Image (cartoon, rainbow, N blue to C red):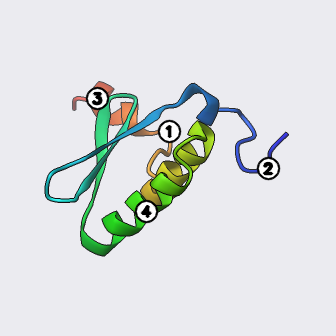
């Protein structure tokens, strides 16, 4: 078992990306946009993605790392708690 992806979430491919004409990278998690990467960071990310383009798990790992720890489990509280 990999120490990085203990729950095997990356095999489900939750992350997708889109490269715009301006060179920005839009990152999506389960269909929702969560991050836009600009300029140098986008260039570095595109280069890394091209290096591992045959390995979907490595691409998922790159996208997960650049998004950081965005999902904490309390996202539904805002939707359901309408006080």
Q: Do the residues labelled 3 and 2 touch (CB within 8 Å)?
A: no
Q: How many labels does the image show?
A: 4
Mark nearer the N terminus (2 vs 4): 2
Indicate the position of residue 83 as horizontal and vertical percent values.
22, 32
Q: Label 3: which residue?
A: 79
Tag in front: 2 or 4 = 4
- Which of discs 3 and 2 lies nearer the camera? The answer is 2
Per the image, the residue denoted by label 4 is: 47
| Residue lying at 61% horizontally and 40% vertically, measured from the top left | 57
Mark sitting earlier along the chain (3/1): 1
What distance separates the C-alpha of mark 3 from that of mark 2? 33 Å
Assess disc 2: are there few (<14), some (14-19) or many (≥20) residues with their C-alpha within 10 Å of its C-alpha: few
Q: Which of marks 4 and 1 is nearer the N terminus?
A: 4
Residue at 47% from the left image edge and 50% from the top image edge: 63
Residue 16 in sight from this viewpoint: yes
Mark earlier in primary sequence (1, 2): 2
Assign a secondary structure to mark 2. loop
* Residue 73 - label: 1
In-image side of 82 versus 66 (left or right): left
Viewer-proximal residue among 58 and 36:
58
Label 1 crowd bin: few (<14), some (14–19), many (20+), radius 10 Å: few
Q: Going 71% across and 34% down the picture, which residue do you hit?
A: 7
CB-based contact (under 8 Å), mark 2 and mark 4 = no
- Distance from disc 2 to disc 4, alpha carbons, whole Å, reads 25 Å
Q: Spot the residue most to the left.
A: 22
Report if the CB atoms under discs 4 and 1 are less than 8 Å apart.
Answer: no
From the viewer's perspective, tell me whether residue 1 is left or right of residue 29.
right
Q: Is residue 69 visible?
A: no
């Amino acid at each position: 078992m990999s120490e990085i992806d203990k729950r095997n979430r990356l095999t489900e491919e939750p992350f997708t990306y889109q490269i715009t004409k301006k060179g920005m990278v839009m990152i999506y998690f389960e269909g929702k946009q969560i991050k836009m990467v600009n300029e140098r960071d986008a260039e570095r990310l595109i280069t890394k993605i091209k290096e591992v383009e045959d390995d979907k798990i490595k691409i998922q790992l790159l996208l997960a790392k650049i998004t950081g720890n965005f999902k904490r489990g309390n996202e539904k509280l805002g939707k359901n708690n309408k006080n």
